Image (cartoon, grey):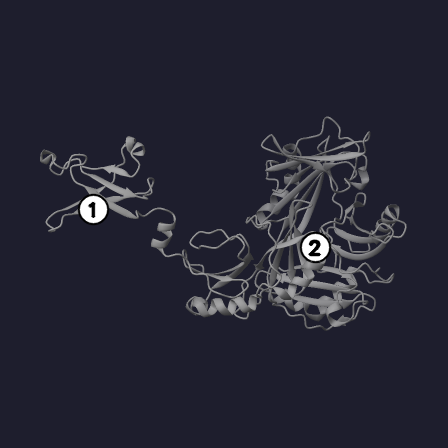
Amino acid sequence: MVLNHSDGIDEQGKSLIWAYVYHSPAIDSTLMFMVSDQTIIYTGELGWEPPSKTGLPDNWLDSQQAIAVAEQAGGQNYRQTNQDVFVGGWLSRQIYPLLADSAVWGFNYYSSTSDPMTLFVDAVTGELLSDISVELTAQQRLADVLQAAQNWAADAVLTLVSPAAPLEINGVAAGWVYVFYSSSKGQYRNFYATSQGPIGSEAQTMAQPPSNEPLPTGWINSDIAMAVAEANGGGNYRAANSNVLVVGSVSKNILSYYGEPSKAVWRFLYGSSTSSHFIIYVDAESGAFIPQSDPILTTARYNLEAADYIVAGFSNDAALTYVMNNIGTIASDGTADGWLFTYYSAAKDSFVSYQIMSGYPAMIWDFDGGLGSKDELPENWLNSDQVISIADANGGTQFRTSYGDARVQGLLTLNYPGGNYQISPETPVWRIQYSTSLADTFLIVLIHALNGAIIPPISAIEEALTAGEIPETFALSQNYPNPFNNSLNKKNSTIEIINVCLSGGSSLSIIDVLPESVLSQPMVYKPDFLEKAGLLEVD
């Protein structure tokens, strides 16, 4: 199997990274090699079941040839008429039902402004294959999924169903994820279904589902539940906003905050770039709309319980390393649309991040935030509402008032990079940044995350002294090394300077005691200066 990884495929069939999947029947192992610029950048076991373990033919068409067929058949028009187009591609057997044993290129075209489009190309002949529907409801291939789960564990029960891609208005998606639990194995396992091809599966390692209780046998399909959601606020949300994306899931324990953990519920989250998100609940057995009052904007700690719960499925040694709001801005009461919680597992030597919105998981991915801190935050860190009130009182409110488009971001971490601040690595810090669309216009407030104290920046002189950039003592030796030789006059005097930054730009000014004359010139360091530590010769 061959597929592009990370980056999309351009019109010439090029991608930044390609992944090549090999299977060995002798050892029953499947490896993936990721290649960028003809260099292998990653090698590891494949964590999911490939569509086929049969080898590809030697004469398969390269991506440049295959995508040329797809572009001519509608791909080029899709790129030109839509925004933010992403094209994913894969080459394998068993991905096109009518030619199950043949090697086929599949290209998925995605855009935030249009429905996705999938085109298939015969990987040997280059023939464009007839289009087939790539969208399906949650129950469309449920029988196949149940059979695959039974092959994994006889006591496997279905606990959660969620779309693998955004939901369309009629409740269909390009693929679905089904999470099963086996009490005999004590494990969860994910199964994946699309409209064609075999059922894929992989171990559930990234998150713990809300419940290990089975869904009722009569749970309603996604198209029915979506229709209820659209009629009870979803349609109005679409009409009032642009670029609306909808994700959803059906499970028990979703309404645990309301004392109804045993009720199976469809939960739909509507999101848009132009508005705060919107949540709708539908009874998964009766199809009735469930009016609930989930807070749309929440503080960081409101979402911590959900993050701690699901990270247990990733690793039992996972330590919370930092918290940040990654969606929208923080309001003056310390609430935001969504919060990101990043954990580090020493056992796995890897990070995992959970985006939580209104107390429920919205997204999961491998992410270290670029800070690299692996140290666990203390449990008693101040909540976002507490630190925002402190930050607002120290310039934040004035900034919000002065700039109508002010945005506020918050970050909680240990090992804060110093910069203009003197902070020990073990000090937990909330970094609150106020910014605006105007270039170089921002305000940063650092707050001790345990006691709420403001951490002031180092002044320019204090910072320079700390870095060793300002001399500490000075001494002038006239006519050095022979002060009695008047013929030297003012020539070849030596200035002794302690603790000066050799690489910095410096200048020297000499004022006599009258003062009648002033000498000012750049300091030019001679090559032999390093051999005369502390001495600088000037004319």
Q: Does residue 190 sit above or below 483 in this rendering?
A: below
Q: What residue appears at the point 35 percent right and 50 percent down from the top-left corner? A: 465
Q: Which mark is residue 110?
A: none
Residue labelled with disc 2: 311
**Residue beneath label 1, please?**
509
Residue 527, above or below 205:
above
At label 1, which amino acid type do we have?
Ser
Q: Nearer the viewer, residue 219 or 534?
A: 534
Local SS, label 2? helix
Towards the viewer: 25 or 453 = 453
Q: x, y (%) of residue 107?
A: 68, 41
Q: Residue furthest top?
A: 58
Residue 247 visible, this angle: no
* Residue furthest right in the image: 154
Residue 415: x, y in percent? 53, 52
Q: Is 313 placed left or right of 343 in the picture?
A: right
Cα distance between the residues tagged 2 and 1 = 62 Å
x and y percentages locating residue 529 in the rendered image: 29, 34
Q: Nearer the viewer, mark 2 or mark 1?
A: 1
